[in-house]
Each structure stands twice: as C-alpha cells, then as structure tokens.
Image (tube, rainbow, N blue to C red):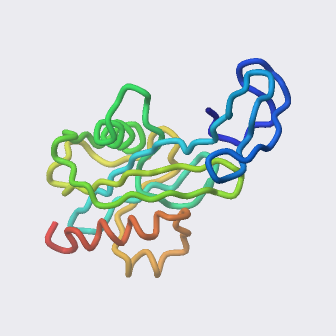
C-alpha cells in the first residue's frame, strides 16, 4: 500500500506493471504476484466556532503554503479521528479540547493533483469548550477568526476543500457560539 502512485514494489523493488484487477487498472508486482494498493491518507480537523467566527490557520507547509484552512492533519495509526483532530488543533493553535466534545460535521476525499489523496474527517466545537489561547504554532504562519463574510473581504485564499468545511462549521453554530 502506498499514498503516492508507486512505480516499484515496496516489498521487493520490482518495477510494477498495470494490470486489470477487480474491474479497474491497478499497479501490480509480477514478482510478488500482488497488487500494490494506492490508498488515501486519513486526516482529521476541527472547526472551532466562536463569537468572532471560525478559527482558521494559515498554512506554513505544502501543499498550499500561505493558504488558510481549518486546523487539522494526518491521523496517527493508533488514534481515532476525533483524537487526531484534537491533537492537530493543539499542535497548530495551542487550543485544547476533549475529543468527546467534538461533533462530526463532514468528510471529504481530495487530491492536490500530485497523486496523493486524503480522506479528511471534519469536526466542529464551540470555542467555549476549548482551553487555551489560539496562537500560530507548528506548521502555521498565523491564525485568525473569520465569518464567511469577513474572510471574503480578506485577501486570503482557502485551501482546497476547506471552503466547504469552513462554511459547514459556521453553519453548524453560526453566531450562536
């Protein structure tokens, strides 16, 4: 299994060929007689909604360096999605939240066009349920609170499918946060 399209078998190093398996073309190792699966990486994020809007983080890593997104990132192999979302929120913004307080808001599948795909599970939480102060930390240039209207007046760009997650978080709690 690989997160990027493979040219060589990760087990034996043999050059892969395309073979029709289970109704579609897949990368295949003739030496191992195995399909080398190309699977998406699991990710999780959390939209924090407060009186001033939704917390967005300006990315300091590719893809989309300089663009804004809901805080989140890759899940670790041993953690459930809400735990990963809470960990990523703390790593990127310093805000801490109990994973049990997160509410599922969406899930999307996307690629940045480089052959890597992700499946991202999105959560939402009220800012009042978080501890700490939002600051730019690991992998983040800046943080800010935005409504859809104030972000539209801002010169920033939302990263990929985060436009939908941003809107979903705001619609979930809106000005009732």
Residue in the image at 81% along x and 34% along y: 16
Residue in the image at 32% along x and 57% along y: 47
Question: Which residue ends up furthest to the top in the rendered image?
Answer: 12
Tell me the quarter of the picture where residue 148 sits.
Answer: bottom left
Q: Is residue 10 above or below residue 156?
A: above
- Quadrant assignment for the C terminus: bottom left
Q: Is residue 88 above or below residue 52?
A: above
Name the side, left or right, on which 79 lies relative to 157: left
Percent coordinates x, y for residue 5 in the rendering:
72, 42
Tell me the quarter of the picture where residue 49 sits.
Answer: bottom left
Q: Is residue 146 above or below residue 25?
A: below
Question: Which residue ends up furthest to the right in the rendered image?
Answer: 15
Tell me the quarter of the picture where residue 10 sits.
Answer: top right
Name the side, left or right, on which 23 lies relative to 18: left
Query: Which one is in front, 13 or 26?
Result: 26
Percent coordinates x, y for residue 78 in the rendering:
37, 25
Residue in the image at 55% along x and 58% along y: 110
Query: Which one is in front, 57 or 111?
Result: 111
Residue in the image at 58% along x and 48% along y: 60
Percent coordinates x, y for residue 91 in the rendering:
40, 37
Name the side, left or right, on which 21 lies relative to 43: right
- Quadrant assignment for the N terminus: top right
The number of numbered badges drawn on the structure is 0
Name the side, left or right, on which 118 lies relative to 167: right
């Amino acid at each position: 299994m690989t997160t990027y399209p493979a040219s060589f078998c990760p087990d034996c190093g043999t050059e892969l060929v395309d073979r029709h398996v289970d109704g579609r073309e897949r990368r295949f190792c003739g030496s191992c007689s195995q399909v080398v699966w190309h699977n998406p990486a699991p990710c999780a994020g959390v939209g924090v909604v407060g009186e001033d809007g939704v917390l967005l983080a300006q990315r300091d890593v590719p893809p989309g360096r300089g663009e804004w997104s809901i805080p989140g990132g890759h899940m670790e192999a041993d953690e459930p999605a809400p735990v990963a979302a809470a960990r990523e929120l703390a790593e990127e913004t310093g805000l801490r939240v109990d994973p049990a307080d997160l509410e599922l808001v969406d899930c999307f599948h996307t690629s940045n066009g480089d052959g890597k795909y992700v499946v991202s599970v999105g959560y939402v939480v009220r800012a009042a349920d978080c501890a700490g102060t939002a600051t730019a930390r690991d992998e983040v240039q800046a943080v800010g609170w935005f409504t859809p209207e104030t972000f539209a007046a801002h010169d920033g760009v939302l990263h990929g499918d985060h436009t939908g997650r941003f809107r979903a978080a705001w619609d979930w709690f809106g000005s009732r946060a």
